[in-house]
Image (cartoon, rainbow, N blue to C red):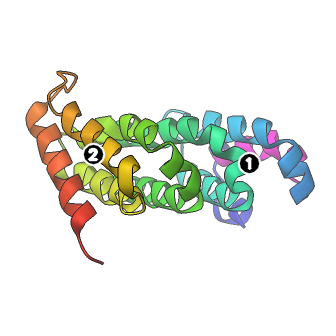
Amino acid sequence: QWKELNCTKDFSNFVYEVQQYTKSLPMILFHKDIIANILIKHILVKDTQAYEPLLSLVISFTRDLQEEIYEYFPKFYEAITSLLTRTSEPKIFESVFNTIAYLFKYLLKQLVADVDKTFFMMRSLFESNKDYIRRFASESFSFLLRRIKGEKLKKILTIILESVNDGKSNSIESYISGIGLLLSETIKVS
């Protein structure tokens, strides 16, 4: 689909590099490590004109392989969120947020199991000086928190609240705002 919709050199380079590994689902599963690394490499291309199809393919890749590629979530997350600092284009922000939301949906079980690692990975978004980034981070992470119960919930909430005073924030006011939004989103009744 994307070969016809995105004819940029950036995407053509990606297709050329990945096509030999994607002829069938068994091949994709066998070459998942190579494919994941190629996707990450191309998302990180400076000023890429192929961000939209690449992010869409990350979603499809995650949907199809789910726990098989969970080990790549941190790398995907880092590459995808790096787009937030490399652009000011609303369309790219929307694609980034949409992609992360789908990754959370398809990797829910694994992310809930590693919720503390996921929180620390997302920390920079909670302290962003941009309100819409803090809001998105809060909405996304609250999706995970609402699925946690008992001692595990108590533990992660303690980690979150203690992080406010740990001195690791670049902007404490923004971070407090982000954590406040997170807690507010978490207790919302849907």
Looking at the figure, which quarter contains the C terminus? bottom left
| Residue 105 falls within the magenta-colored stretch | no
- Residue drawn at x 69%, y 45% is 69
x, y percentage for residue 42? 62, 38
Is there CB contact under 8 Å for labels 1 and 2? no
Does the magenta stretch mainly form a helix, a strand or a loop?
helix
The residue where tag 1 is placed is: 68
* Secondary element at tag 1: helix
The residue where tag 2 is placed is: 157
Looking at the figure, which quarter contains the N terminus? bottom right
Closest to the observer: 34 or 47? 34
- Residue drawn at x 33%, y 42% is 155
| Residue 21 falls within the magenta-colored stretch | yes
Specify the amino acid type for callout 2.
Leu
The magenta span reads 11-22
Closest to the observer: 133 or 107? 107
